[in-house]
Image (cartoon, rainbow, N blue to C red):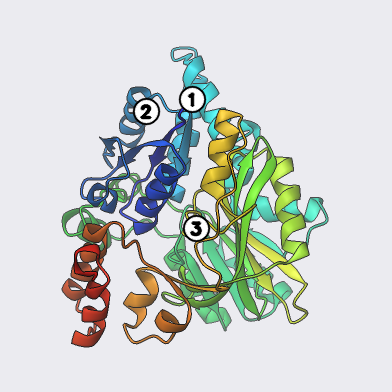
């Protein structure tokens, strides 16, 4: 049996294209639900593509799923995961009764009774405390009175987060009560008119239109600040069992509190135990990530949140027990495929294109393994073009080094 994987995404993140390539490399047929102009269209990794429509999100997702008939659906961003949860809830209605669709989503996402725990940051941290796992105090904030009370209890600085956001967009660190009030008002507000229409008209991203029309206010939580290093674990799970995982310490981020651009591979027993306990309790399936803070004692790791979708390191084939796409493909076929070798012997990995977009002269691009998809030159060139259009600083030498490694330029 050849596994058929459906990647579902509402935005044009580069990571989804890399994930499609990784699944194809381990023998899967890959279909994609995505917005027009997604980077995956520049690759040979996908078989069929179905259009995501921001003004009809659930209908477009459902139509793509029914047409693709996949063995598993992998959400590639938080909104995609939310849409899949909503489609599952719809399928429980008496006028729907689509048992095949329900079965697929249960197989893909895990126990539906746990969806509400996954969708709310504060509830997930509460679950971690129930399981006696290390995690900072977290509370939902619904008004300024609760905010002042939590600031008094947690102390400053504090971290404020809004549900349903990713990539650091819904995270603010407040160093004073006034900062916290400003952050709360910003995170709790419906999408701004200018931001909504800029996203729709310039970025061709209509995902904010419905929340703007409905005046939707995200749930905001406050978390005690832990000053130390960021770390993350990406996992492949099947019915609550962790099949493979990649643990990394974050050395650099693309922007403050944003996605990692340089990571170091690590082993941390507390992170591993936390992930296994939560995966078993939530009966997780598919790909997801868990974010941690490494405290001054390098073995002390505090869970700060879960990313209930594929993360940007899930595509990396790093050898036995660290190849997430191969592990999922094996689970789908019921066969144990031979373990592949790691793509690199280095512990430090610079993620493309984020670290290159940070700085084309970054020393990590020379000292670390630079994760460039040379086998897909159109994808690489699109990233180069995007950087130049965005006004990024680019030297002739750095561009020439990049282009010299494309397949048609190799000696």
| Tag of residue 389 | none
| Tag of residue 62 | 2
| Quadrant in the rendering for residue 338 | top right
Find residue 166 and report its horizontal and vertical position in percent. Answer: 46, 59
Find residue 31 and report its horizontal and vertical position in percent. Answer: 34, 36
Q: Which residue is mark 1?
A: 1
- Closer to us: mark 1 or mark 3? 1
| Quadrant in the rendering for residue 75 | top left
Precedes in sequence: disc 2 or disc 1: 1
Binning the other alpha carbons within 10 Å of mark 3 as few (below 14), some (14 to 19) or many (20 upward) gives many
- Name above or below for residue 344 compared with residue 322: below
Find residue 50 and report its horizontal and vertical position in percent. Answer: 27, 35
| CA distance for labels 2 and 3 | 29 Å
Q: Tell me if 34 is positioned left or right of 81 in this view.
A: left
- Name above or below for residue 298 compared with residue 15: below
- Closer to us: mark 2 or mark 1? 1
Q: Residue at x 60, y 51 (%)?
A: 235
| Quadrant in the rendering for residue 70 | top left
In front of the other: 345 or 34: 345
Q: Badges 2 and 1: C-beta atoms under 8 Å apart?
A: no
In front of the other: 320 or 112: 320
Kindly tell me whether residue 308 is visible in this rendering: no
Precedes in sequence: disc 2 or disc 3: 2
């Amino acid at each position: 049996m050849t596994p058929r994987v459906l990647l579902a995404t509402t935005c044009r993140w580069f990571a989804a294209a890399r994930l499609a390539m990784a699944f194809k490399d381990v023998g899967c047929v890959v279909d994609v639900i995505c917005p027009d102009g997604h980077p995956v269209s520049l690759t040979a990794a996908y078989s069929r593509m179905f259009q995501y429509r921001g003004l009809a999100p659930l209908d477009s997702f459902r139509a793509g799923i029914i047409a693709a008939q996949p063995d598993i659906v992998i959400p590639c961003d938080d909104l995609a995961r939310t849409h899949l949860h909503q489609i599952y809830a719809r399928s429980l209605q008496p006028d729907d009764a689509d048992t095949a669709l329900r079965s697929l989503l249960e197989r893909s996402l895990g126990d539906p009774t746990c969806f509400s725990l996954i969708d709310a940051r504060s509830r997930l941290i509460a679950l971690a405390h129930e399981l006696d796992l290390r995690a900072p105090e977290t509370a939902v904030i619904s008004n300024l009175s609760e905010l002042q009370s939590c600031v008094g209890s947690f102390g400053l600085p504090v971290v404020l987060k809004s549900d349903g956001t990713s990539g650091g967009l819904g995270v603010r660190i407040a160093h004073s009560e006034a900062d916290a009030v400003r952050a709360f008002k910003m995170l709790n507000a419906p999408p701004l008119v200018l931001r909504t229409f800029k996203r729709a008209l310039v970025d061709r991203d209509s995902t904010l239109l419905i929340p703007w029309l409905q005046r939707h206010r995200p749930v905001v939580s406050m978390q005690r600040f832990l000053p130390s290093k960021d770390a993350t674990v990406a996992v492949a799970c099947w019915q609550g069992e962790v099949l493979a995982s990649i643990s990394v310490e974050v050395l650099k981020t693309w922007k403050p509190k944003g996605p990692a651009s340089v990571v170091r591979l690590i082993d941390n027993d507390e992170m591993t135990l936390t992930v296994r306990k939560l995966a078993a309790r939530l009966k997780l399936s598919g790909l997801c990530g868990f974010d941690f803070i490494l405290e001054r004692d390098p073995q002390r790791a505090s869970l700060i949140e879960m990313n209930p979708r594929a993360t940007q390191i899930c595509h990396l084939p790093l050898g036995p027990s660290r190849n997430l796409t191969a592990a999922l493909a094996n689970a789908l076929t019921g066969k144990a495929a031979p373990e592949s070798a790691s793509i690199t012997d280095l512990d430090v990995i610079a993620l493309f294109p984020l670290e290159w977009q940070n700085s084309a002269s970054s020393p990590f691009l020379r000292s670390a393994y630079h994760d460039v998809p040379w086998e897909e030159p159109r994808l690489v060139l699109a990233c180069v073009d995007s950087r130049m259009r965005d006004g990024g600083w680019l030297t002739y030498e750095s561009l020439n080094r990049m282009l010299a490694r494309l397949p048609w330029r190799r000696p």
